[in-house]
Image (cartoon, rainbow, N blue to C red):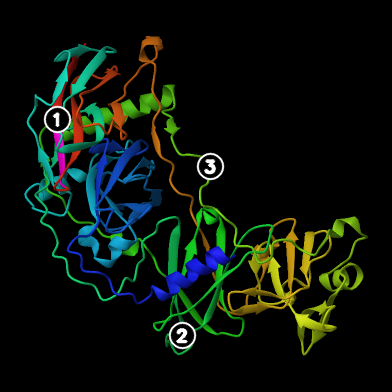
Amino acid sequence: MQKYIFILTLLYFSLNLPAQDTGKVESIVMVTDRDVYVAGDRLYFALNLTNTDIESNSFAYISLNNVNGTTVFSGCTEIVSGNSFGTIPLSDTLESGLYQLVSFTNCLRNYGRDYFARKSILVINRFDSEFGFEKSIAETSAQESGNDVAITQVSDNASEITTDNQQYHRREKVKVELQIPVTQRVISITVRQAAPVEFSLADKSEPSLTSIESCRYLPEKSGLVIQGTINDESGKESTGLPVYLSCEDSTANLQYTLTGADGTFRFFLNPWYFGKTIRIKPENDYQGSITMDDKFSSASGFEMPDVTVTGNIKQFAAISQKLLTIRKSYFDENCISLTNTETKNAYRPLVYPQAARVIKPSEFTYLPDFMEISREILPFIKTRLSGGEYKVSVFDPEKQVYNDLLVFVDGFLIENIGQVISLDSRKIKKIEIVTSQRYLGEILIPGVISITTTNREIDNINWSHPIYSMKLENIMKQEIPASIDVASLQHNIPDFRQLLYWNPLPPADRNKSYKFETMTSDCTGIFEIVVSCLGTNGKLKEYTKVFEVIH
């Protein structure tokens, strides 16, 4: 308990800490396995966080936006040793057109969207007979953006990439050797069918770094930080107001903090909270509103890239549609998860370590409501109706008095016992009672009664005061494409993979050459090996080598 109280105190006093003007800000770069996708396919991405000595973030956010600025996907990924990677399943319902991936950390939000990583892609809906994106591509091909990550395109047959042949037959082994300069660090390698469209990314100038008045958005090192504001009924910010956070569980858990001068509150959520539902509420008698911070609001919108069509994009789109349909008909393209299943730094913020008494109503005769349950089988508990409200209290044997209780249902702190007074003994799995006083920080807890229901009765509770409920999503898995043993694949089973190889974890040793092998599929045409590197200047650079697959 002392551990998370310390963290909450640290977060509270960090509310108005001035940010240091170091002249440097962490930077995030992003690459994808391809530039053109078919709706229903998978997009693979890799992120790299630089200047991590400035702010050490362990989590990054990623969203996919369409040209209207609507977010069609959002998620959170873990940064390990400055790197992260994963996959985004592209829905079959995505319309054909340009899309943009945006990635950022919570700390980067202090400096504005100019510091976010952006990567534009083209998505083709495999059920479209006509492509409405042709006009938009033609219109954007003459525009200049400067909003995407700067990439310097290296000419074909670069000496840094060598292959054992220039032409290959279908289902033939391709041997590749890389000799990347020591000044460049490889962050991803992809081998893909070349698409007749290029996102010519102009050199992005560094945004001017100005000192910010306060670090409103804190670094997220071993968990996530959520924040919001509370205003009273007149719209004025509430200062110094206790705010409570609890989470669905079979055991009572609780965090609390106080709102700052601008009505802002923050909570630190360690990995135990991931994938669970949380509820946030101020003290019971407060009337006002809770507004939660939306981390993806600053990533919405679409910054138009500079697009160049280098061939028959309509024909490429039509062929890609058919190839994906065939692949889905014959086998599933699965992913391999490299995420460690062990949850690190996860701990439950318990209200009490062990209940003094645990009662299971199923072990007794049926009782129709909680009033009868407390009267018949709950020692030291008194439930009564007073002034039209139900109240519950616990007897303190030392002081020989009855004290008010905090009431939890399915792990959540509720307003009063009247919200669950109708629960009968069949709907309650267990009841835990703590009669002794406890302190949560500076808050005195005179006693606790924790009710665990058989079927999430917390979802049926009516609330009289402001409460905010949200489902905290799980962190995205780090996944790569599952390998296909092309050599053992029956010849009557088609293999129309346009992505032959994707590796977001190349070796870190830049002083040695790196060799790898892949297999061509049944697709013919021009393929390209693209090696994305990060230079000492923090700029992204691509080395490209093409080869041809013939019948």
Q: Is residue 477 above or below residue 206?
A: above
Q: Position of residue 448 (x, y in %)?
A: 73, 71
**Residue type of the residue flagged with mark 3:** Glu
| Label whose residue precedes the other's in the sequence (3 or 1) | 3
Which portion, as a residue range, is magenta?
Answer: 539-544
Secondary structure beneath dot 1 equals strand
Quarter occupied by the C terminus: top left
Q: Earlier in the sequence, mark 1 or mark 2?
A: 2
Residue in view at x 50 percent, y 68 percent: 6
Which amino acid type corresponds to the residue marked 2 in the rendered image? Ser
Q: Secondary structure at mark 2?
A: loop
**Residue at label 2?**
238
Which residue is nearer to you in this view: 13 or 240?
13
Earlier along the polypeptide chain: callout 2 or callout 3? 2
- The residues bearing labels 2 and 3 have C-alpha atoms spaced at a distance of 40 Å
The answer to which quarter of the image holds residue 283 is: bottom right
Is residue 458 among what the camera can see? yes
Residue sitting at 58 percent across and 74 percent down? 441
Name the front one of labels 3 and 1.
3
- From the viewer's side, name the closer residue of 131 and 35: 35
According to the picture, the residue beneath numbered tag 3 turns out to be 342
